Amino acid sequence: MLGVDPIVAVKPPDAFLFRSVTMYFLIILFLIHALNLRAASSLPPDLTECSLEELMNIPVRAASKYEQKQSEAPADVTIVTKEDVKKYGYRTLADILRSVRGFFVTNDRNYSYNGVSGFNRPGDLNTRILLLVDGHRINDNIFDTAPIGRDFPVDIDLFDRVEIIRGPGSSLYGANAFFAVINIITRRGRDFKGKGVEVTGEAGSFNTYYGRLSYGARFDRKDLEVLVSGSYFNSRGPQLFFQEFNRPETNSGITRNTDSERVPSFYGKISYKDLTLSGVYHSREKGIPTGAFGIAFNDPRNKTIDTRAYLDLKYERIFDDRWGLTARLFYDYYHYDGDFIMNDPPLKILNKDVSHGTWWGGEAQLSRKFFDRHKVILGAEYRHNLRQDQFNFNEAPFQRFLEDRRSSTIWALYIQDEITILKNLRLNAGVRHDQYSTFGGTTNPRVALIYNPFRSTNLKFLYGTAFRAPNFYEMFYQDGGVSQKPNPDLKPEKIATYEVVWEQYLSRQYRLVVAGFYYHIRNLITQRLDPQDDLIIFRNLGQVDAKGLELELHGRWAGGWEGRISYTFQDARNVQSGTPLTNSPKHLPKANLTIPLLRNKIFGGMELQYLSRRLTLGNSHVGDALIGNFTLFSRNIVKNLELSASVYNIFNQRFRDPGGEEHLLSGMFGIPQDGISFRVKLLYAF
């Protein structure tokens, strides 16, 4: 039967799954209520159990480029802490984003792609979120990709917290801050226990192994802090079945040892007084099991290698509580190397796809408080792309299809003013102008009105525009007339977003968030087949309208109990045709619960994530899915020892994600995702 996987178990129908997810969410709600009563009545409070309102006052930096309370930030903000990472067993940044209200992730078995506000088109390269590490831009200068899987350059064990800033951020950050800005705050040397040495090891399904050795310290004079860390990850990957290759000559659609992944990584940071120097070297080699781009199926030689490195020197100082100065210099390196065994028997020609990018730049930002009612920041940024080179050739016999060597420059100016109109009314307004040597300039404003009618009530009215510059892959990549041609005349995409956010503290234990959004995208860069020559080309053709509603209830109680439940409705449509966007689930309910099984020693972390069905490029649908994960986490049963065991996709849901144009018939069948899997992890601090 068309679309049915004869090896993978058939999914239950949507109605059954909807009843199942409703039942599980009701159980979670009942547990939250019942266990809250038990915890509140039997466990005394301690200093680690701050109220939810106090927890929400963790400083946020990325929303305004300076620290402020979450309630005062001009955006809808979510913070994920290192405690969340441990108690829920998150393995990558993609795992974190899957758990966050309104976000979803697609995996094509090579890269993971983030979706938000109903937008995550198959074939896009994760270019509409801006990814930062301690304020340093991670998106590369060839594809503008924000890596969120194992290709993210910093180990998740080095995260202190993740700031997720929804909405357009181009008024401060420029390109790619289209739907969200995500800033990872890394740990400091002082955060390491004992003598400052940490050793981590883990093992899991699919012959997966990981090890890390880290050292961090703050020295006696307290002016100097050091953190250095190295790690290695290796996985053979699962055996997979692809319906579209179910033929004798392609091993009946079964592929083995082609989903492998190897990741060596190094991170270092040294701080002295107001100066911080940080650096990364990270390389990921990933097998390609999907037969993408017409390559030979079930051939372990197909792979991509992504290498990233950077150095970042930052100076930051506050003078007399009124003046502030932040300045940084940076140098970045990105190299992509793809090996593709072309499906042209009997030759099996190796095609090499190579991109090489290097860039340097700097930023300076000056802030000043006026009369305790204004906080103004002025900033300037410059980036020089030294190399933005792309190559494509067959190795033997040698045949060159692309040799494109380029460079470019970008400069920007921005200003933002936070005005206290009344004690309970703030206005935050800013604007930034970016100037590109490739297509010219673009200017983007943001306005936020934040009103606190009561101490427990916070209302935010938000408007902003953002842009995404066409990347060099879209403008200049071509393969000699085989399948794709360039379009150097592409213009930037533009988005205008309207948001209303209501944050309500129902007591010291509960926080309710209700958020609504509407956005309009114009000049959407869209992949099209030119009827004149049947070659793929990127053009500014699309317009998108989308609206949505998000609800979240977060609870935190004595004894370490914590839970949240959320629901997102989103409707994103193509303006010209009125049809829903591909890979855009309408419904995203989620639930999380942390249970202290032995006070401050052992915790259970449970989460449920539901995705409604999604449209594919072949105008069919991949089915909905209910994903459940469970983690058992313990610490200090033996001093300085942490142990955890996690089971992922505990219901063994056999679900698929829509694929892009490069995945042949995956538009009809979808790309299979992992079934049930496990991981055990050990961390010891000396």
Image (cartoon, grey):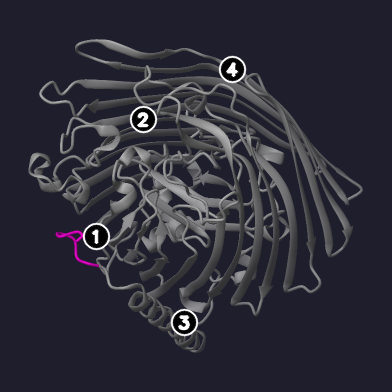
Q: Which residue is mark 3?
A: 29
Q: Residue 613's spot in the image, x, y percent? A: 40, 63
Q: Which residue is mark 4?
A: 408
Q: Secondary structure at mark 1?
A: loop
Q: Which residue is mark 2?
A: 306
Which residue range is magenta in the image? Answer: 1-10
Magenta segment main secondary structure: loop
Which numbered dot is residue 675?
Answer: 1
- Which of marks 2 and 1 precedes in the sequence? 2
542 on left or right of 666: right
Q: Say which amino acid is labelled 2.
A: Asp
Is 433 placed above or below 427 here?
A: above
Q: Say which amino acid is labelled 3.
A: Leu
Q: Say which amino acid is labelled 4.
A: Ser
- Which of marks 1 and 3 precedes in the sequence? 3
Q: Residue 447's spot in the image, x, y percent? A: 78, 50
Residues under labels 2 and 3: Cα distance?
43 Å
Residues under labels 3 and 4: Cα distance?
54 Å
Other-residue count near label 3 (Cα within 10 Å), few / some / many at <14 / 14–19 / ≥20: some
Q: Residue 612's spot in the image, x, y percent? A: 42, 65
